[in-house]
């Protein structure tokens, strides 16, 4: 068999630059700050850093609204700083993957400025412009070209008085969608990507890349709703990208991961089939949608462990023969996993480490979002005034106007924001127990979570039982044991409400993973005779009385190394 690609045994760490480390006291993280914290990443053992957007941007959506793809925003530093970061990471044996946000630009990007200047502009067709619905007056409610809804509430269209047309924007009104049907748009993106690869970046995380192809007439089954991601050219564009960009660098070990809200298993197989050469792996959204209620993400419902396992199990099975999974609980758009799926109170440490164990030992490439490796938690919002994220603010305003999906009240939406809002993941990384957690000497743009006094990196480095060291051991286990990256996966105890258990097998090795995701002691009715513990997070993981998470390995596996630092 061919040598498996390097990224199957890699772990990726996501840096959200605004909240990682500030170096100049303006309260906003920056690239020089990231460079100061590379010991942390190296100690953790990750292979790749994915940097959320640091490009020039008006920051309407924290950098996911880009006004210059080939420059760094002064908030975050300069191109020189970024070159320095790439060099530092490479020297330490790590790679840098950039965020590629090309479904849309900022409305302040020169392309859009020209496009909106006049209907006759040579850039007009670079974006998606449409007249009002027949028989309606532009700008009035209901006159939008179709019924598409924005991810950030309300219609997905913004009326442009000056030229008498609407432009499409699936996200913020300051994030107009590019028209990918136009070959000049595609060529501009390919040349920008080549420029970055030649500068030294090692791949791309592609923002909502299954949304770039739109149903050409903007009608069809999705015309009235909130379902994108099935445009007819979604596969074709990625194959063109491969030919026009990645194929030019056959000697580079590049990584591509597509973020794909709503992607199905069947489509993910096509995207990640190595023979089709589209992307290496995709971020799917099924498991992070299981707790969305009838009114959407701000109407959360309790999550049943059986549903979570069934969902992840389907993805494991579906991509077992062909394709590859990207594994994540957390990122900058999701609430903190230990608060959402676990227990951020009494069983905080056991819960954070058990969740990590479950995720990292599935088959696929795990992603760690900054602070997850410390077990960082959701934050208490006193009122809507504590929220900064546009998604939360728009959803709340919609509820106040009596227009929330499912008729949710503002109080219900605020509770939903407390549980699910994106700001939960965006508070500064908790480095130490000092006033602003070592993040900044100024005033942080979003307050540091109050629990930083005890929940911080400094406190965890010296504690071998810490969440940090558990993540470090899981990452080391993947690097040392081929069964972790390559083994087949079979779910065990599929109907259990409290225990998440599965088995991995590869070349005669057997690894059994058991995590107790309840708050009580549970016996695991599993036959694991003759196996030894290679990794655990409690003293009680002896066969048969597992509490918390335990990883048991079959004969032939040693301890992964008693390498406590
Ligand atoms: O997110 C796309 C996406 O579908 C989301 O997760 C969405 O932002 C929202 O949380 C839905 O509830 C990507 C980026 O990750 C996100 O930060 C950006 O806001 C968005 O695209 C637009 O670029």
Image (cartoon, rainbow, N blue to C red):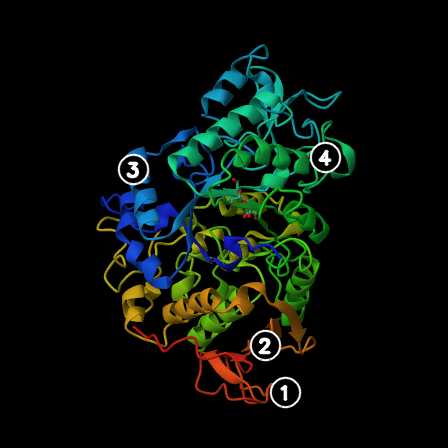
CB atoms of marks 4 and 1 within 8 Å: no
Which circle's residue, 4 or 3, is located before the other in the chain?
3
Q: In this view, does 175 lie to the left or right of 452?
A: right
Q: What element carries label 4?
A: loop
**Residue, disc 4:** 232
Quadrant of the rendering where the C terminus is positioned: bottom left
**Residue, disc 1:** 527
Which circle's residue, 2 or 1, is located before the other in the chain?
2
Alpha-carbon span between mark 4 and mark 3: 39 Å
**Residue, disc 3:** 77
Which circle's residue, 1 or 3, is located before the other in the chain?
3
Task: State whether label 2 is within 8 Å of ligand 1.
Answer: no
Alpha-carbon span between mark 2 and mark 3: 48 Å
Q: How crowded is mark 4: few (under 14 residues within 10 Å), some or many (20 or more)?
A: few
CB atoms of marks 1 and 3 within 8 Å: no
Q: Position of residue 367 (x, y in %)?
A: 49, 57
Task: State whether label 4 is within 8 Å of ligand 1.
Answer: no
Residue 319 seen anywhere in this rendered image of the structure: yes
């Amino acid at each position: 068999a061919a040598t498996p690609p390097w990224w199957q045994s890699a772990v990726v760490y996501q840096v959200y630059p605004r909240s990682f480390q500030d170096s100049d006291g303006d309260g906003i993280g920056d690239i020089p700050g990231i460079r100061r914290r590379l010991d942390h990443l190296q100690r953790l053992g990750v292979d790749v850093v994915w940097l959320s957007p640091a490009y020039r941007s008006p920051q309407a959506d924290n950098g996911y609204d880009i006004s210059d793809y080939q420059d760094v925003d002064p908030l975050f530093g300069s191109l020189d700083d970024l070159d320095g970061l790439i060099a530092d990471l490479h020297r330490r044996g790590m790679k840098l993957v950039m965020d590629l946000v090309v479904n849309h630009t900022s409305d302040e990007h020169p392309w859009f400025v020209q496009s909106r200047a006049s209907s006759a502009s040579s850039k007009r067709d670079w974006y998606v412009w449409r007249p009002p619905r027949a028989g309606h007056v532009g700008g009035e409610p209901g006159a939008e070209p179709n019924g598409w809804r924005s991810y950030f509430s309300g219609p997905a269209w913004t009326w442009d008085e000056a030229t008498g047309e609407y432009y499409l924007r699936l996200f913020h009104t300051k994030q107009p969608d590019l028209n990918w049907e136009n070959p000049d748009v595609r060529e501009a993106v390919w040349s920008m990507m080549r420029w970055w690869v030649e500068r030294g970046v090692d791949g791309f995380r592609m923002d909502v890349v299954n949304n770039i192809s739109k149903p050409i007439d903007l009608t069809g089954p999705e015309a009235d709703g909130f379902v994108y991601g099935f445009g007819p050219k979604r596969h074709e564009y990625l194959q063109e990208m491969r030919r026009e960009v990645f194929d030019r660098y056959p000697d580079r070990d590049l990584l591509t991961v597509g973020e794909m809200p709503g992607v199905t298993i069947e489509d993910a197989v096509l995207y990640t089939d190595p023979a089709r050469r589209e992307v290496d792996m995709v971020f799917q959204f099924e498991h992070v949608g299981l707790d969305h209620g009838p009114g959407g993400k701000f109407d959360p419902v309790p999550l049943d462990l059986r549903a979570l396992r069934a969902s992840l199990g389907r993805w494991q099975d579906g991509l077992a023969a062909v394709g590859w999974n990207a594994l994540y609980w957390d990122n900058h758009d999701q609430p903190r996993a230990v608060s959402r799926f676990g227990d951020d109170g009494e069983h905080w440490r056991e819960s954070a480490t058990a969740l990590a164990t479950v995720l990292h030992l599935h088959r696929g490439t795990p992603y760690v979002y900054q602070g997850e490796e410390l077990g960082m938690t959701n934050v208490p919002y006193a009122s809507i005034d504590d929220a900064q994220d546009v998604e939360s603010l728009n959803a709340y305003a919609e509820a106040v106007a009596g227009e929330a999906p499912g008729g949710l009240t503002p109080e219900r939406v605020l509770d939903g924001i407390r549980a699910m809002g994106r700001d939960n993941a965006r508070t500064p990384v908790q480095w130490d127990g000092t006033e602003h957690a070592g993040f900044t000497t100024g005033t942080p743009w979003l307050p540091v979570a109050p629990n930083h006094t005890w929940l911080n990196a400094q406190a965890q480095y010296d504690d071998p039982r810490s969440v940090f060291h558990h993540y470090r051991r899981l990452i080391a286990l993947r690097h040392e044991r081929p069964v972790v990256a390559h083994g087949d996966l079979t779910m065990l105890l599929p109907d259990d409400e409290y225990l998440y258990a599965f088995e991995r097998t590869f070349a005669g090795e057997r690894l059994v993973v058991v995590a107790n995701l309840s708050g009580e002691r549970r016996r695991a009715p599993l036959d694991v005779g003759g196996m030894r513990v290679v990794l655990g997070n409690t003293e009680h993981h002896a066969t048969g009385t597992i509490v918390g998470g335990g990883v048991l390995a079959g004969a032939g596996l040693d301890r992964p190394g008693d390498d406590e630092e």
